[in-house]
Amino acid sequence: MTTTESDKSSNWIHAEAPDEGEIQHLIATYGVSERFVRDALDRDEIPRVETVGEYTYVITRFAYKTHGGIETAPVLFALSTKRLITVSLDQLPSLNDVMRDVSEKAVDPTLIMLRILLYIDAAYDGFIHTASHKVHDLLQYLDKGDVGTDAFIDFVHIEDDMNDFLSSLQPTNASLRHLLSSEKAPSFAAHRELVDTVILNNDQSIQTCEANLKSLTSIRRTYTLINSYRLDRTIKILTLASVFISIPTMFFSMYGMNIGLPEQHHRLAFIGLIALCLLVVWSAYAIGRRKKIF
């Protein structure tokens, strides 16, 4: 566990991956709810807000990069008039920058929380910006017709990240708007301008995520149409080839039978048969072009 406290006073306590003893210390010393602390250590926990006793509990999610891609993890903000307690399984984005801001500027627990949220927003914005570039590259690959298995894997990863970001950002904005209008959290109204900034940043990230998802859906639909057209054209060409091959095959098969046939001993029978086959094939081709079959 990493525990961080402000230089000036214990107005911010951060617990990173606390063990059982450290969890009990937080509960006994600062009076936070055990339920919310344990919820913050559940990787699948969803964002929400609730006020119990002296604390307002806000659970949101932050994004971070791993070797396998981008993941999100929950973080708990337990806010009272005296202090802010944060609990997370993984390191918060730009934690050192947050600590420097706290030691140099921030003494109000609500202000500390909002600064942390701004750094979380900045991390989201960076990941979303990178995803937008990838979507743009995928569009270029589509224009060139160079869309393979790797591109579809990128589709899945980007779409999964965008949905994960939306499931974090949208509830967080709902929580912040609730806190702005709640009488139980008057400190948020005192920092309305900064809260509005966080909400605006989240709204912009949400809009970009939704735009990326729409682009991915459009790319997938367009590729499906192109692929269907190519498949239809290929099947049509193969079908016509089979028809054109079957015409001369029919005539040659008849004259290969061990029975008497008209003009089979004529010296120009072979040339005439070839000419007849070409005439029938050309007629079938001309009719097909007139009917716009191909």
Image (cartoon, helix red, strand yellow):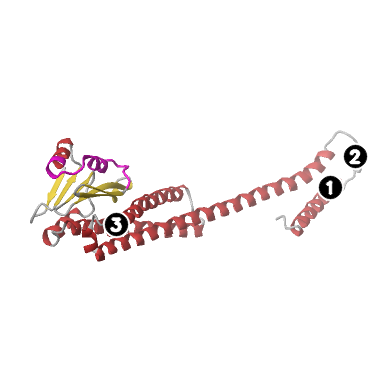
Secondary structure at badge 3 equals helix
Question: x, y (%) of residue 235?
Answer: 65, 48
Q: Residues within 10 Å of mark 2 (few under 14, many from 20)?
A: few
Name the residue: 81% across, 51% down.
280
Q: Amino acid at mark 1?
A: Leu
Question: x, y (%) of residue 277?
Answer: 81, 49
Q: CA distance from mark 2 to mark 1?
A: 12 Å
Q: CA distance from mark 3 to mark 1?
A: 86 Å
Q: Which of the labelled discs sits on residue 176, or is there none?
A: 3
Residue with the most extreme left position: 8
In the displayed structure, does residue 242 sit left or right of residue 181? right
**Which is more toward the observer, 130 or 99?**
99
Q: Which image quarter: residue 252?
A: top right
Which residue bears the numbered disc 2? Answer: 261
Q: Amino acid at mark 3?
A: Leu
Which residue bears the numbered disc 1? Answer: 273
Q: Which residues are magenta?
A: 27-46
Q: Which comes sooner in the sequence, label 3 or label 2?
A: 3
Secondary structure at badge 1 equals helix
Circle nearer the viewer, 3 or 2: 3
Residue with the most extreme bottom position: 193
Circle nearer the viewer, 3 or 1: 3
